[in-house]
Amino acid sequence: MKASAEKIETCKCAYPLGQCRRGFKGTLVSVCPLAGENGYDADELELRLLELGFIEGASVHVLHEGPFGRDPIAVRVNDTTVALRRSEAMAILAE
Amino acid sequence: MSSAPAINPPQASQPDPDAQPIEVALVGAPNCGKTALFNAMTGATAKVGNYSGVTVERKVGIATTPEGRKFSVIDLPGTHSLRARSPDEEVTRDVLLGQRKGERVPDMILAVGDATNLRGALRLVSELKKVGLPIVMILNMIDIARHRGLQIDHEALSAELGIPVIPATAVRKGGLDLLWQTVDPLLKAGLAEPQPSSWEVPSTHDMRVAMREAERLVNAHVIRPPEPDTVSAKIDRVVLNPFAGPVILLAILFVMFQAVFSWAAPFMDAIDAGFTWLGGIVTAVVPEGLVQSFLADGIIAGIGSVIIFLPQILFTFLFILLLEDFGYMARAAFLMDRIMGRAGLNGRAFIPLLSSFACAIPGIMAARVIDNKHDRLTTILVAPLMTCSARIPVYTLIIAAFIPNRTVLGGLSLQGLVMFGLYAAGVFSVLAVAFVARYVFAREERHAPLMLDLPDYKMPILRNIALGLYQRARIFLRRAGTVIFWATVVIWVLSTFPLPPEGATEPAINYSFAAMIGKFIAPVLAPLGFNWQIAVALVPGMAAREVMVAGLATVYAVGGESGLVHLLADQWSLATALAVLAWFIFAPQCISTLAVIRREAGSAKWMWVAVGYMFALAYIAAFLTYRIAVALGAG
């Protein structure tokens, strides 16, 4: 029971990247897509995000927001810049 | 040891003319400079085609080493991973694993990585090593990396990876020296026999392990400058600004429009004059009769009416290639993704659709930048609905005949407003059809995410642009020489035979098959308010939309456009004119476009789908326009 309580603690201060505004800087805590969202296989989305460099421990920085509805977002991950939609960025937790 | 033929694989050592040369595959992520490297290695020997059955571009060229060895280089589609997720990436995987019919397995892999961003490339190499083929890794664009202060210990990387790792640059003279110095001895000694592949689809765990290993290699062997590159970040701060970004995009589009419509005009006029001159010579030299008509009116006029679009196509591609090489295309997709996404299109569909304002052909060809199969297909199918320049002659003719030349709403030209309305109708129909298509044939398909690298900005390499344009021009001209040529011949035959009887009073076309077909389909078109003359003009108009104008002139036997304007204003009702305009918004009246759809979509099925839905929309739109106009008293 203690372990799960700790996990909840961690999640409290981590934000889904999909909700972060421009200027957010942080460290990637977890990449964990939920099954059935975005019409994707959760593993497939996780693999794609990993390939683009979204891996636990990476530094993330939301550089730009799309001009219409602040979507998609451009994120600096370590030393590359990646554009993705907020719906997919919800699978990324950062603190 | 002079040539060491004994060590070579047997098929390469014998002077058998049927022997296949060594084939080397270039594999790497998009934006790693693979194409520039391919161009530098193979020069203008590259042949561009398609892999059978798919829209994926296949590029093969011949490279000659300084010691005179020749080998063929295949530029496999860019991929981040062998875990293929688009048709392009599937081709790369299947060719490497020997699973693609009609493609041989390459003898060696050149794994190309962007030296300024090695992590992904190192991960890809870890996958490629499992394929079992000999590998050489290339640290491409090493000049840019050095310029930014990155120091890469390629010898240490080579020792850790167990494969040769060679810095290279495609743009500088001598940039490939080290590559040749490594490849030549390898070829001389004979390549290792391929090992059975141990590659399998990585799990998320495998992927994390591979990413961490790549991270470790980078940290161990790459010394990064204290100050990271800020030029791209600075440009992005302006170009992706929520206010300035769209304005800059619009400005770029405006210049592109100018180029396609205005700058291309003198070249188009020159081509037109050239073909007219050629036709004049034929008319002068060949005695009057069928042969003269076939050569002058059929072949020269027909081919000329297609080749005249070459300048627009090249200008469109000049912009696309420049923006792509510079790194702006990914930014345009970023800016437009939300709007395009509403209609079920990908942000990357923006430029292809825009190019279609000039002509659907370059637009459809440009749809290759879309990596998702269904997004690309949707874009190809809707691109012909954008108001292309070939519709302009038809629109201007009918507007001049029926829309009064006066101003409304305080200074706006009514004729201009109607023209604008026709353009808007085109754009609206593109978005609406794409929206519907998403539900019709992509229902069970996952929606396409936008996940793309925003690469660092780079100066475009002129040589690459020139080669790219040359390849586009060749593809287009080859088609003009085959499909379009035969279509032209068929349409000439239809509008010429049977010949008019002796002492015929009506124009010759009225006795031809075209007239028979026109009169045959006239009852079908009658509910749209189309008379039989319109139906007849539509038959040669299948070759290209603007030919309809010439067709009407022939059927009504009037010379000159102003004569035609008066005649139409006299003969047609306003309702009929409006119905013809509505018809031309949708109708697939362009054989070249249909041929390109067939080619780019990879099957005739999608061409017929386009023909079917566009004729259906044209019919419905013209019918409703005519009926409503009649009901309002314009009949």
Image (cartoon, coloured by chain):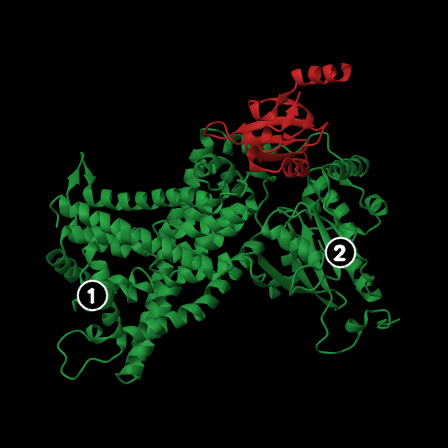
Chain colours: A red, B green
Q: Nearer the viewer, residue B492 or B265?
A: B492
Classify residue A85 as left or right of residue A25. Answer: left
Classify residue B377 as left or right of residue B302. Answer: right
Chain ID, mark 2: B
Q: List x then y, in percent, for residue B419.
A: 26, 46
Q: List x then y, in percent, for residue B344.
A: 46, 40
Q: Residue at x 62, y 38 (%)?
A: A41
Q: Are marks 2 and 1 in contact (CB under 8 Å)?
A: no
Q: Which residue is mark 1?
A: B553
Q: Badge 2: few (under 14), some or many (20 or more) residues near its Cα, within 10 Å?
A: many
Q: Is residue A13 visible?
A: no
Q: Residue at x 79, y 55 (%)?
A: B132
**Element type where label 1 sits in the image:** helix
In the picture shown, does residue B231 fall above or below B329? above
Chain ID, mark 1: B
Q: Badge 1: few (under 14), some or many (20 or more) residues near its Cα, within 10 Å?
A: some
